[in-house]
Image (cartoon, grey):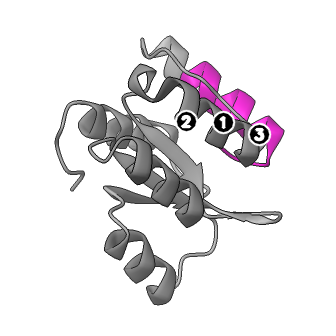
Amino acid sequence: VDDDEALVFLVERVLTRKGFRVSSFSDPRLASVALRERAQEFDLLVTDYNMPGFCGVDLLREAREVRPELPVALASGYVTAEIEQQAFAEGAGALIHKPNDVEELCDIVQKLVHGNKPD
């Protein structure tokens, strides 16, 4: 989930090529609806931290309400100690720094989907 449509497209292509089935959203409100309606279909939520009118932490909280065990990774292009602390305090399994190396992103996704904490 990211308001940057080009980034959403790129990440979806990369993860699909790696064998993942991807549901991508550039509107966090649509992602929220999908989480509520189809929570069991998702193995991982990767969301941007800062989107217009919506915070990735809010989406993380919604995910926790409907499916507490769902792994969540928050991504941000501007990571402060406060953002990092908030992400992990709310239960994020990883914090992805954007722009990020594509292989590193795939590694984080792989680890979280299979129940491992990223390094």
Using the image, determine if residue 89 lies above or below residue 55.
below
Residue bearing the label numbered 3: 26
Using the image, determine if residue 14 lies above or below residue 79.
above
Residue bearing the label numbered 1: 33
Report x, y in % for residue 18: 43, 16
Q: Nearer the viewer, residue 16 or 33?
A: 33
Circle nearer the viewer, 1 or 3: 1
Q: Are marks 1 and 2 in contact (CB under 8 Å)?
A: yes
Q: Is residue 6 magenta?
A: yes
Q: Give the quarter of the image for residue 26.
A: top right
Residue visible at 78% across and 43% down in the picture? 27
Using the image, determine if residue 109 lies above or below residue 55.
above
Q: Secondary structure at mark 3?
A: loop
Question: Left of 41 or right of it: where is 51?
Answer: right
The three-letter amino acid code for the residue at tag 1 is: Val
The three-letter amino acid code for the residue at tag 2 is: Arg
Q: Main secondary structure of the magenta part?
A: helix
Residue visible at 45% across and 30% down in the picture? 39
Report x, y in % for residue 76: 59, 64
Q: Secondary structure at mark 2?
A: helix
Q: Earlier in the sequence, mark 2 or mark 3?
A: 3
Q: Secondary structure at mark 1?
A: helix
Residue bearing the label numbered 2: 36
Report x, y in % for residue 80: 52, 84
